[in-house]
Every structure is written in structure tokens, then in C-alpha cells.
Image (cartoon, rainbow, N blue to C red):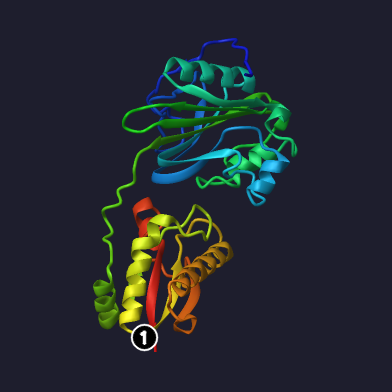
Amino acid sequence: MLRISLFVAAIVAAVPVAAQDVAGGRDHPMIGRYEGARMTLFKSRDHETSLILKKPITSADRRANGGKRLGPADAVPVAGRTFRIRYEGPAGRSSFEVAGNFREKLKAGGFETVFECRGGDCSDLGGSDLYFALHDENPMGSGDIHSNPTSQVLITARKPRAEGDVWVSIYATDVGKTPEVLVDVVETAPMETDKIVFVDAAAMEREIAANGRVALYGILFDFDKATIRPDSKPTLDEIVKFLKARPQISVVVAGHTDAKGGFDYNLDLAQRRARAVAEALTGAGVAAGRLKPFGVGMAAPIASNDTETGRAKNRRVELVEAK
């Protein structure tokens, strides 16, 4: 395992927000900051799914991930309360020194190192590939730190807890003579799933009779894919039951997404998911002519996309009666 030399043991516990820190920012209490650093970015979400790199990025893994730098071949999906914090400085320190201090801090706090890499050892695809993987393919946002492949250091660590593991990714690099550090923390915990009720065939019939449509939250997909998860079967079975009981009804199968990602991307994802649902229903005996898959994407939200609770309501499949 890579060892990073320590020059100064300078990671401090969470400190009060300094005047020069970004407004609303705060240190994560388990991580802290390097002494003398300034916080220049702070983001948090109540519930988010992130991909945490567990090994170097390789061309073979990228092919296995369908062209993406992060995926099942080289990353661990973790979900929970998520934080992204960027620090700059202090001037005169190096990314290697700063990252090494963070590693020792994590170790002392009960974290287990999952993966470490430095410079070109992080990927066989090019120096900036790690940067693009952590930023362009991370749901917390893109472009949140500068890229300097020769000075980059990544440390991934995990702390087991009964109430849910904590995952940390530390990415450090040098910008001129000043280090920058991006700290990603995911406090894993089950998302509250009892807020949206299961809709059975009778409820589908009532909703469509009253409103011409019914929103369904029991059809779930693999992250960023149109693959229907096995736990969607109860809802699919109820749709089949409803449609077989009402053979005169045809429906639009409308796929809806939240607003994360670009408009065209979400439109395509929604269309593929709607098509997957229609194909599953056809496979269960519903005539294909009664089903019209349609991708709405992010164009018809029913809640704010600024919170995970709102985004969860926007990610749905609707059945719309087709006259």
C-alpha cells in the first residue's frame, strides 16, 4: 500500500467557521481540516448515491462500465447523507503532505483505508482521468477542484458503524504552490421509504378514473440505467392486474426523472425506462398495442429538485389513460 510521508501532524478537529470561509460552510466533525486551510466550497444533501473509487481506473474497467470511468467494475455505490467540502492552502505545503495528514487523522478516528493512489498510478488512461471520474461523473457536481495529475493524491476510507458506515474520499492536488483538497463524505443510512405508499390495482383504477393518471413509485431502476430492479415486481404485477381487468383501457407509460444531469440526458433515460416498463408488461401478457412508452424526463416535476425528498417524488413512472 502506498505510504505518504508526513512532515507535520496538522489536521485539526472541526473548527468554528472562519471569516474567510465560504458562507454556510462547516467542517465535517469526523474529518476536520488541515491547519491554516480555508474552506472555499461546501455542499450537502440529505440523501444521495455516490460512487466511491476502490481501485485504479483502467481501460478494461471502463469498457466494463459501459464507457464510464466509475461503475461496478471499479467503484462502490454508497448512499446516505452526503457532504462535499473543498479547502485551499495553506501556501507552501504540498498535496502529499496534506493528504498524508488526512490519512493519519482518518486512521486515528477508526477509518479503514480502502484505496490509495498517487499521480499516474491512479489510472492507466491518462493523468486527468481520475479528476474527470471524481468530478464529471459525481452527482455532487463537477469542476469543484483544479486538476494537476502529477501532484494528485486520492485516499478512500471507510468507518464501520452500527447505524451505518461512513465513507470518505480525500482528493488533494497542488495549484501553483498552494494545495487544494476535496473532501467527500457519505454517512450511509437507509433512506426513509415509507413516505410514498404502495399503489395496488384498485387504487390505480380509482386514480385514473378521477384524474386520468396515476403516479407509481414502486418501479425502481438500477442507478443511472433503465434496468428494472427485482423489487419492482409487486407494482408491475398490480399494473398487469389492473390492465387485464380493464381490457378497454390503453395507457401512456410515462417516465419521469429528477433534474440532476442535462435535459437531453434525462429525456433519453426517461424514454429508455418507460420502454423497459412497457416491455416488462408486454412480457407479462399485456398487448403491446395498449402501451405507449413516453419519456418526459425532468420536464414535469411535482416537487422541488433542490432536496432529495423532492427529487424522490419527481422520479416516478406514471400511467396516463390514452383515449
Quadrant of the image occupied by residue 115? top right
Q: Answer whether residue 42 is visible to the viewer in this image.
A: yes
Q: Position of residue 88 (x, y in %)?
A: 56, 29
Q: Position of residue 171 (x, y in %)?
A: 58, 30
Q: Is residue 135 left or right of residue 15?
A: right
The residue lying toward the viewer, choosing from 319 and 283, is: 283
**Could you tell me which residue is drawn at 32 percent across and 29 percent down?**
162
Quarter of the image with the C terminus is bottom left
Q: Is residue 125 left or right of residue 211?
A: right
Q: Which residue is mark 1?
A: 249
Q: Is residue 113 left or right of residue 199?
A: right
Amino acid on which disc 1 is placed: Ile
Question: Disc count in the image?
Answer: 1
Secondary structure at numbered mark 1 = loop
Quadrant of the image occupied by residue 215? bottom left
The residue lying toward the viewer, choosing from 252 and 81, is: 252
Q: Position of residue 195 (x, y in %)?
A: 26, 55
Q: Is residue 123 above or below residue 108?
A: below
Q: Position of residue 252 (x, y in %)?
A: 43, 79
